[in-house]
Amino acid sequence: MSTACTYDLSSLVYSERSGKLLWRSQYTESAYAPDGSVVHGPAKAPLPYYKLAMAPGTFGGPSDTLFVEVGIERDPSWRLSIPASLAGGS
């Protein structure tokens, strides 16, 4: 999942607010749930998910390097589920 705000493109900070874990913009009031959905605007678009690969022979670079296919967004049904204990649920 991208950790750049879809509104202002700033790097997001993971923090707790009112007992909930959120990804928050450093410059606006935009906030996202751990799954990337918008909790509070001005952001309107959720955080996109991208395909990750460890294939240095295909992409070039050293072994054990994680590559992101930027621009190829994954379908929401592909997303891994987040256990409630990690997502701030009870």
Image: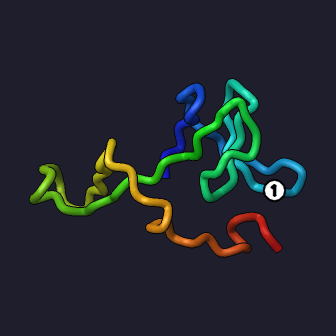
Residue 34 in the image, given as x and y percentages of width and height: 65, 57
Q: Is residue 77 left or right of residue 71?
A: right
Name, please, the residue furthest toward the left.
57
Write the residue at 65% across / 41% down: 13
Query: Is 2 placed above or below 44 here?
Result: below
Q: Quadrant of residue 75?
A: bottom left
Residue on which the image places disc 1: 20
Label 1 Cα crowd, 10 Å radius (few <14 / some 14-19 / many 20+): few
Kindly identify the amino acid type of the residue bearing the numbered disc 1: Lys
Q: Is residue 22 left or right of residue 2?
A: right
Q: Which part of the image, by quadrant, shows the C terminus?
A: bottom right
Write the residue at 72% across / 50% down: 22
Residue 24 in the image, given as x and y percentages of width and height: 69, 40
Q: Is residue 15 left or right of residue 57?
A: right
Pick whichever, 13 or 75, lies toward us: 75
Write the residue at 75% across / 31% down: 29
Pick whichever, 86 or 31, lies toward us: 31
Write the residue at 58% across / 40% down: 45
How many numbered discs sit on the rendered protein? 1
Residue 32 in the image, given as x and y percentages of width and height: 68, 46
Q: Is residue 71 left or right of residue 43?
A: left
Query: Is 90 placed above or below 66 here?
Result: below
Secondary structure of residue under mark 1: strand
